[in-house]
Amino acid sequence: MSTDSQLKELALHDISVRFGGLTALDNVSLRVAPGRIVGVIGPNGAGKTTLFNVICGFVQPTSGSLTLDGRPWRPRPHHLSRLGIARTLQGVGQFAGMTVLENVMVGARHRHAESEALAALERCGVDRYASAYPGALPYAIRKRIELARALVAKPRILMLDEPAGGLDADEIAWLGALIKATGTTVLLVEHHMDLVMSVCDEILVLDFGKPIALGSPEEISADPKVTEAYLGAAA
Amino acid sequence: MTTIESRPETATKAPPGAKRRRRVHPVIVIALGAVLVVALTYVLPPFRNYQLATVGAYFCVTAGLTVLTGLNGQLSLGHGALMATGAYTLALAQNRWESLPLSFALAVLVTTGVGAVIGLAAARLRGPYLAGLTLAVAIVVPSVTSTFDETFNSDQGLSVFLEPPPEQYPMEQWQAWLCWAAALVVVLLLALLVRGRFGRDLRAVRDDETAAKLAGINIARTQVLAFVVSAACAGVAGALFAYLAQSVSPGAFPLTLSLFLLMAIVIGGLGSLFGALWGALLLVVLPALSQSVGEQTGSQRLEGNLALIVFGVVLVVVMLAAPGGLASIPSRISRLIRRNR
Ligand SMILES: Nc1ncnc2c1ncn2[C@@H]1O[C@H](COP(=O)(O)OP(=O)(O)O)[C@@H](O)[C@H]1O
Ligand SMILES: [Mg+2]
């Protein structure tokens, strides 16, 4: 049993999500082993954020099930942090009326919230903005603050929804290094192909909610279905 | 741990100097406040002491309301009705058992319970629907007094039996002490409560519910707790009003009271306990001013409306001059000075 749960820390079994007539996810299965960096890619509207929303309990799957550490699991958003799962939002969901430091402290669920929040800000290179308010800061800085708030909880599973959006090449390189260095399980939704290809151990490709490929970066970039559905459309 | 080289970008945009400001501990502020109030009660004439006592009573409810509305983003038009609940409970308990501490405890307890019920419903509602619910409370609670008029004696209300204070102290001074003792305890507890994690949770829920959930915050529980805490404060205030007036009647807690309370905390500075103090002060000073103006012009019909107009004007002027309310003025000034140096 323990080897089984080690093999799949988090697993999705035949997940489907329908919004009225629209099928946002169509029989998606995914097994995520501890410490692996798993990318989820696909064109806009492919269902990537919906997949994250299912794992976070924001969206109830129409059918299918989830397991965490091999046990059946029905996620609830405010339980995630206690279970060691942290997620960043696609937009920057920040608390506008609180300082940057307080924003990150909200994510800290420990006694030493302040020192840990400062450490997380430092790790993301934005500790000098601790007493500023996020609304006035540039987008790239706010992205880092968002990352710091996810990291401060010391999650075992980190879910990043388009963390590279709006960042320049240098910042994306920094982000890639950070993701690799976390040592945790990472689920990464991202459009930036270079980043995905360079950091991920495994990639799931969605197209109109359907899983069309799953494999290593090499396998994915060689897969004609992917080139057709995603890379072809993007080119 | 692996360190990752971070690229300092737009470093010049960072605020200069210290990473964060250290605040004075609330206990110190409250202790200073207590000394100031006690000193004031020895120099003020009796009527002013009575007004001071009233400010203390208002401070309890404005402090609780500013935590609910300012920090947690829940608008309540029902706090006047919650005060009525506290006032009537005190009156009924006092006339039955004649023990002021017991009556106060019951008043707070009952109001907290009522607040919990409203809070549970409120946590499911947002924006105008929440305002509507609390408005309904504001209208229903006073009408309860006329429905069960054997207990509440309808529009006449109840008089409250009170022991006279120790004879070496004038009545008004004693009242000011009691009201401010209650107010300072309430505000100290609130200050301690909101400076830590609970305060951060309140504001996180106010600013972004989705992000707050992902940070592990139970939204509904936080909102209900905020309502309960705020209701307890309103209960204390209501009990103090019954004690001060030595009577309670539905007319003392009209819907306009709830409106005044909201305007007061906005003028003072939403979410700030100092702002709540400013608000409490205005709640006593502005009606007194409009009353004397009304008397001078010989128009008695105007009195009630005049207070509302004066409050409205002050609200507009303060919002134009200092959008953060009166409590934000010191930091605005210091920022101006720093910029011009
Ligand atoms: N809550 C929702 N209600 C209705 N439709 C939704 C909802 N969330 C997402 N969708 C739809 O589901 C599809 C997948 O969306 P999304 O998961 O956001 O795509 P991606 O993140 O891959 O760009 C889109 O067509 C989107 O409009
Ligand atoms: Mg998306």
Image (tube, coloured by chain):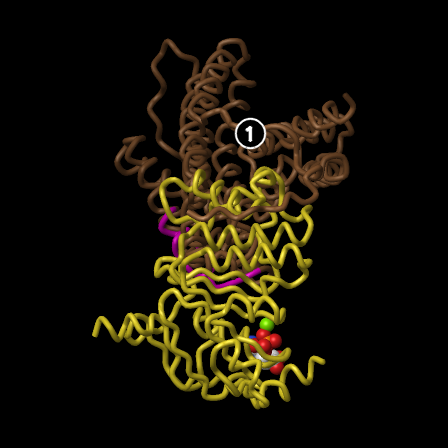
Chain colours: A yellow, B brown
Q: Establish if B314 lies above or below A4.
A: above
Compare residues B319 and B284 and report the one nearer the observer: B319
Report whether A136 appears left or right of B38. Answer: right
Asked whether residue B257 is in view, the answer is no
CB of residue at label 1: within 8 Å of ligand 2? no
Q: Residue at x 60, y 30 (%)?
A: B278
Task: Look at mark 1 in the image and give the residue it sits on.
Answer: B21
Q: Is residue B86 magenta?
A: no
Q: Which residues are magenta?
A: B112-126
Subunit under mark 1:
B
Position of residue B4 measured from the top left corner of the image (x, y, whole percent):
52, 48
Position of residue B140 measured from the top left corner of the image (x, y, whole percent):
49, 57
Position of residue A138 measured from the top left corner of the image (x, y, whole percent):
69, 50
The residue type indicated by label 1 comes to: Arg
Q: Is residue B120 magenta?
A: yes
Q: Residue at x 49, y 88 (%)?
A: A26
Compare residues B205 and A16 and report the one nearer the observer: A16
Question: Quarter-wise, where is residue A184 in the image?
Answer: bottom left
Q: Residue at x 41, y 86 (%)?
A: A14
Task: Please identify the dominant SS of the magenta region.
Answer: helix
Asked whether residue A89 is in view, the answer is yes
Q: Residue at x 54, y 81 (%)?
A: A220
Instruction: Determine whether the residue tagged by mark 1 lies in a helix, strand or loop.
Output: loop
Mark 1 is surrounded, within 10 Å at the Cα level, by few (under 14), some (14 to 19) or many (20 or more) other residues, namely few
